[in-house]
Image (cartoon, rainbow, N blue to C red):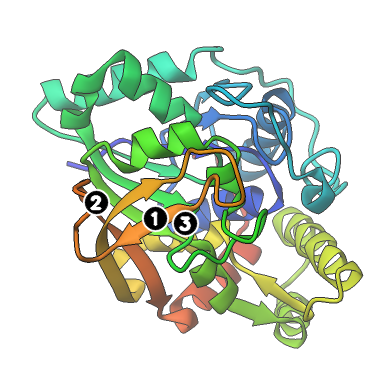
């Protein structure tokens, strides 16, 4: 029996690409939950409703946490634009969120899965606040959590928001600590893996040039061109880091992972330069449950998954 699958997202440029990749490669989510992060929670919800409409994806979208557990909110509009999708045109939709209770939905989904003798999987590509709240309210849900895949954190302490911390963890370190130490089957796709796996600008252009025009192709082009523009302004190489789509690709086919490290992990919570840093301890001296950190994947397969997403043409509501 196929496990229920939850997509938890903060609705940015690469989040949209990740959702398209999942649907185009046969791993459409059954439930979408939203969270603050790249943009505010409500804008993230609007974006994911629009992307779902683009894809003909008829699944419930539940609004989740609108702030971190303890600290002030931050965002990444400098990367994703004020609307979170880099100004890309998106379809108008009359769809509304199914509820404002993403945390309750997570609790019920995992409990229901466990009651049936099964589990539900979840991909989290924003701050980990929704699941942290669910775990605090209902610790028993760990029995129903199957594979938890996360885009976030670092394995060597090379951050993208501070020198030591990656954005999704830094946005709510307390939530991340709760989730990473929960003792469930966890696969982390850290920032270093995202930096190491990309499509260079010439290959991006060639891919879009050979893909017939369609609503999804044109939307995807707008997303990636915005992202490349941000990188040019920062004098970074002209390429498309996969980031959230890389984590989505691992969900589609976990066998693409060619190198990983299994380690105890924790998150630095003290104020200062290292707040939000992901501690990775292969020796296990931290004493926390071991989780898997991805280091390398089969990039050719990720490229193929992405090419399929760019060429995706919805035929009916999924």
Per the image, the residue denoted by label 3 is 248
Residue occupying image coordinates x 69% and y 29%: 73
Residue 235 rendering spot, x and y as whole percentages: 86, 76
Element under label 3? Answer: helix
**18 versus 194 height, above or below:** above
Q: Nearer the viewer, residue 214 or 244?
A: 244
Q: Is residue 136 left or right of residue 38?
A: left
In what quadrant of the picture does the N terminus appear? top left
The answer, for residue 208, to whether it is visible in the render is yes
Quarter where residue 84 is shown: top right
Element under label 2? Answer: loop
Specify the label residue 155 is tagged with: none
Specify the label residue 286 is tagged with: 2
Residue occupying image coordinates x 61% and y 18%: 97
Marks 1 and 2: in contact by CB < 8 Å?
yes
**Mark 1, other Cα within 10 Å: few <14 / some 14–19 / many ≥20:** some
Per the image, the residue denoted by label 1 is 279
**185 versus 176 height, above or below:** below
Q: Is residue 198 left or right of residue 218?
A: left
Residue 168 rendering spot, x and y as whole percentages: 56, 45
Q: Disc 2 or disc 3, which is closer to the eye? A: 2
The answer, for residue 251, to whether it is visible in the render is no
Quarter where residue 90 is shown: top right
Q: Is residue 67 left or right of residue 188?
A: right
Residue 155 rendering spot, x and y as whole percentages: 43, 65
Element under label 1? Answer: strand
């Amino acid at each position: 029996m196929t496990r229920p699958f939850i997509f938890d997202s903060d609705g940015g440029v690469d989040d949209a690409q990740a959702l398209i990749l999942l649907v185009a490669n046969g791993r459409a989510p059954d439930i979408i939950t939203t969270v603050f992060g790249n943009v505010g929670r409500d804008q993230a919800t609007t974006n994911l409703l629009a992307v779902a409409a683009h894809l003909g994806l008829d699944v419930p979208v539940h609004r989740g946490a609108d702030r971190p557990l303890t600290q002030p909110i931050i965002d990444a509009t400098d990367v994703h634009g004020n609307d979170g999708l880099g100004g890309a045109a998106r379809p108008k939709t009359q769809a509304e969120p199914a509820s404002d209770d993403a945390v309750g939905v997570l609790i019920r989904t995992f409990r229901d899965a466990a009651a049936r003798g099964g589990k539900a999987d979840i991909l989290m590509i924003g701050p980990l606040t929704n699941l942290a709240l669910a775990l605090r309210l209902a610790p028993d849900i760990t029995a129903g959590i199957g594979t938890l895949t996360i885009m976030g954190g670092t394995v060597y302490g090379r951050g993208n928001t501070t020198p030591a911390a990656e954005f999704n963890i830094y946005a709510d370190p307390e939530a991340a600590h709760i989730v990473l130490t929960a003792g469930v089957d966890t696969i982390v796709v850290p920032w270093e893996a995202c930096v190491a796996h990309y499509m260079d600008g010439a290959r991006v252009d060639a891919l879009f040039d050979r893909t017939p025009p369609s609503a999804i192709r044109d939307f995807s082009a707008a997303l990636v061109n915005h992202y490349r523009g941000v990188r040019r302004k920062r004098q970074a190489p002209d390429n498309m880091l996969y980031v959230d789509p890389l984590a989505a690709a691992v969900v589609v086919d976990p066998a693409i992972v060619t190198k990983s490290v299994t380690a105890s992990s924790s998150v630095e919570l003290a104020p200062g330069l290292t707040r939000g840093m992901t501690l990775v301890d292969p020796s296990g001296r931290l004493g926390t449950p071991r989780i898997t950190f991805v280091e390398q994947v089969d990039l050719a397969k990720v490229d193929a998954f992405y090419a399929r997403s760019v060429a995706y043409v919805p035929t009916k509501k999924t």
